[in-house]
Amino acid sequence: MAAQFGRLRKGAVNTTVAAVVVAALAASQAPGVTTDDAGRRVTTGTQPSPDTPAENSATGNSPYYTDLPPLNSPKPSPSAGATPVAPGESEAGIPATVLDAYKRAATSLQQAKPGCNLPWEVLAAIGKVESGQARGGRVDADGTTLSPILGPQLNGNGFANIGDTDGGAYDGDSSYDRAVGPMQFIPSTWEWAGRDGNGDGKKDPNNVYDAALAAGHYLCRFGWDLSAQADLDSAILSYNNSQDYLNLVLTWLEYYRKGTHQIPDGTGTLPSDRSDATAGASPSPSPTEPKTPTTPSTKPGGNGGSASPTPKPDEPGTPSPTPTPTPTDTVHHLENAGTAKLTAMAGDSFTERISTRAETRAGKAVAKVRVRFTIVGSTDATFSTGEKYAAAVTNSAGEAVAPALKAGENTGEFVVRATLVGRSVTLDYKATVTERAADTLARTSETALTCTAGGEFADQVEVKATYKGAVADKVAATATLIKSADDPAENDKGPYFKDADGKTVRTLSGLTTDANGLLKLPKLYADDTAGTYLLRITTAGGATLTVELKVEAAATPSPTPSDSASGSPSASPSV
């Protein structure tokens, strides 16, 4: 068993010594930890805090394994004459493929979100608590579990009530959601948090590489720095909102930080204790139908053997009380609550925020329901939180407002989908990202640009781009030496640039302004044709600037006197 201190040699310890060992072990536990009759360490009081809705956690606050790390057993009384055996290696080790997935995910996060400071041991601690390291490393060569690891139906019967959100696509259950895979994501969370960790082009919650990378990104959202205890606590509680869950994960984290080792896949010890306190319970290997409650039988009581009466089920035909509908149940549709056209330039924030109103069939506003906003489509746009999802609760007017959208560099259209959490009620908003633009160009110098024919211009042309008075950075631009103010065709004479091979070029495309909106053109040269020429610079957004270039004729060298008068008439000498 996963959290049992070492087995004692048969007959080596009497009852008194055994009690001392168990008592000492229990005393060394963290708060909220007890030891059962078999000497196993388990956590208590594992009901999640009501502060955060279950559907806003990674796992839906599903049950988790409460087994604790092995401890060095206390030394028994000298009279016992024996020493407990240390726990087996399989109990303390991590299966090879699972360990590799954790380390690979942590390495990826060091590059993607270096400020998060996510150690792989955090993923290992959560993976141990959620699935016993993928049920002891029962995974194939690609890291996919040999059979699905599913939590119980989140049907409100002792658990959160989360209706089906994925049509059973991930959890095989079209009635209610279940936590899925080695990191136990609920489908609605996996939908936005899922990642492809093994590069096979799929995001599979049953794959330990995908699940570990998704868990890493989930823990690193909101700019949390996991090297700070407060942020680490917040991140873990967001995974499963229970103080006892936090204590348990931190205990395993400390254990793994002290050192662990790799064991072969499939040889890990299966956990034995769960927070829902169901004897022998474990996440289901495959979807199962909810069991039909059976009528309890009468059992002898403590009153001289008389039987205690068992409550009888309702008689056939007796109407069951009608359950009171929740606010979520009353929502018929989602309505646009005044959101105007969503358009932003690449790299900018959208000025308009998405607002959605939840309404009944009669159009009455529904307050206190949760709406999830998800960015879908081929785009690198995010919410101001840096994530592609956000959630908000409707106010008294039935309105939920999403955080501000921030455009990425990818241009084009994408969709923000508002979904009523717990129901398949959606509303789509179209958003457009346009390319970066400038509306004004100006030279940074007033120096005249002149050159002698056949020479080169002393000054390079530099311009600054702005848009509505603000710096226009990363704006695409083109520079062309044109024939005239009325003819923008490329000139075939006069000044020119040189390409990398030294060849004449009179059009430069693919130029971009820098972070300060500046664009400095390469050096200009002049051919042997004197005259006044024009350089035109244009940007995305329509900004245009025409610069005058003057090429002066080369000076004609003055004739020099000949050293002799050879060839000229000579005066005859006088006779």
Image (tube, helix red, strand yellow):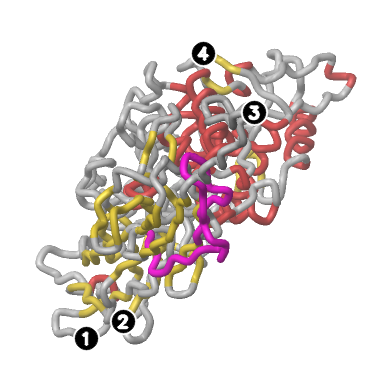
Compare residues 494 and 540 and report the one nearer the observer. 494
**Three-letter code for the amino acid on which mark 1 is drawn:** Lys
**Percent x, y for residue 188?**
33, 52
| Label 4 residue SS | loop
**Bounds of the magenta segment:** 436-463
Kindly give the residue lying farthest to the right in the view shown. 78
**Three-letter code for the amino acid on which mark 3 is drawn:** Val
Q: Which mark is residue 264?
A: 4
How many residues crowd around disc 3 within 10 Å: few (fewer than 14), some, or many (20 or more)? few
**Percent x, y for residue 241?**
52, 56
Which tag, 3 or 2, sits closer to the chain's start? 2
Give the residue pinned by disc 3: 575
**Three-letter code for the amino acid on which mark 2 is drawn:** Gly
Can residue 170 be spotted in the picture?
Answer: yes
Give yes or no for residue 459 being in the magenta stretch.
yes
Give the residue pinned by disc 1: 364
Per the model, the C-alpha gap separating discs 4 and 2 is 54 Å
**Mark 3 or 4: the one toward you:** 3
Which tag, 4 or 2, sits closer to the chain's start? 4
Per the model, the C-alpha gap separating discs 4 and 1 is 59 Å
**Percent x, y for residue 72?**
76, 26
Give the residue pinned by disc 2: 398
Per the model, the C-alpha gap separating discs 3 and 2 is 131 Å
**Percent x, y for residue 244?**
60, 51
**Mark 3 or 1: the one toward you:** 3
Figure check: 63 above or below 128: below
| Label 1 residue SS | loop
Per the model, the C-alpha gap separating discs 3 and 1 is 136 Å
Per the model, the C-alpha gap separating discs 2 and 1 is 8 Å
